[in-house]
Amino acid sequence: MQTHKNPALRSGPAPFKAPKSVTNPATGGAKPTEAPNKPPVFSRDGKKWIIEYQKSNPGLLIDNAEMNNVAYMFRCQDSTLTVKGKINSVVIDSCKKCSILFDSLVSSIEFVNCQSVQMQVLGKVPTISIDKTDGCQMYLSDQSLEVEIISSKSSEMNVLIPKGNGDYTEQPIPEQFKTTIKGKSLNTICVESLG
């Protein structure tokens, strides 16, 4: 280690050293325990439907919903939510292997921190937002073909477009991009994977 040329600094305290880690002899340095399972929640709080910690529940149903209602689904696993009626928006947060079927939305549906999720709209949805999600299948209706899909930090996203008689055409959302510098600006294009 090199000392500073200033003698006044050399006589001062030693530089910061990280404290040595201390292991608890009672636990033997074991890894932290998992958070306890929380009880499942399916409730309505004013205009907000709260669906949390549901596991292996294919029969979640929001019925008699109103246009100013929002639905928030959090940390659910292997569950299906059906929303009857038109509501304002839906947020699916930190869910695994879940699906949602809804009639129509005024605003948007948002997937955040999810894995292997699916959605199907029977009516209209203006915006689909996907953030930090791996695996998102989006089944659209004829009324939702003008949807805006906004994605970031996500992979395995597919849009399924109806082609009649119940069949769908599957289109992947690009995940790989190439950026080049042209003059003083950036030019970014989608790149198809060849593998």
Image (tube, rainbow, N blue to C red):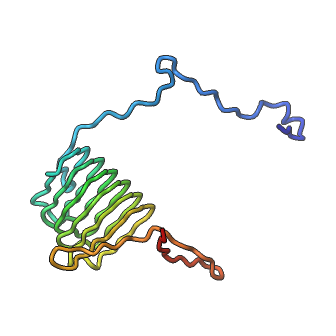
| Residue that lies at the very extreme toward the left in this rendered image | 64
x 78%, y 30%: residue: 13
Quarter occupied by the N terminus: top right
x 40%, y 30%: residue: 33
- Judged left or right of residue 72, residue 11 is right
Which image quadrant is residue 147 in? bottom left
Q: Is residue 67 above or below residue 78?
A: below
Q: Position of residue 43 (x, y in %)?
A: 17, 47
Q: Position of residue 11 (x, y in %)?
A: 85, 30
Q: Position of residue 171 (x, y in %)?
A: 34, 73
Query: How many numbered dots are placed on residues in this image?
Result: 0
- Judged left or right of residue 181, residue 48 is left
x 29%, y 79%: residue: 146
Depth check: give the residue in front, 172 or 53: 172
Depth check: give the residue in front, 166 or 159: 166
Which image quadrant is residue 113 in? bottom left
x 33%, y 62%: residue: 136
Depth check: give the residue in front, 44 or 185: 185
Q: Is residue 181 above or below residue 86?
A: below
| Residue that lies at the very extreme toward the front in this rendered image | 195
| Residue that lies at the very extreme toward the bottom in this rendered image | 183
- Judged left or right of residue 23, residue 82 is left
Q: Position of residue 135 (x, y in %)?
A: 35, 59
Which image quadrant is residue 112 in? bottom left
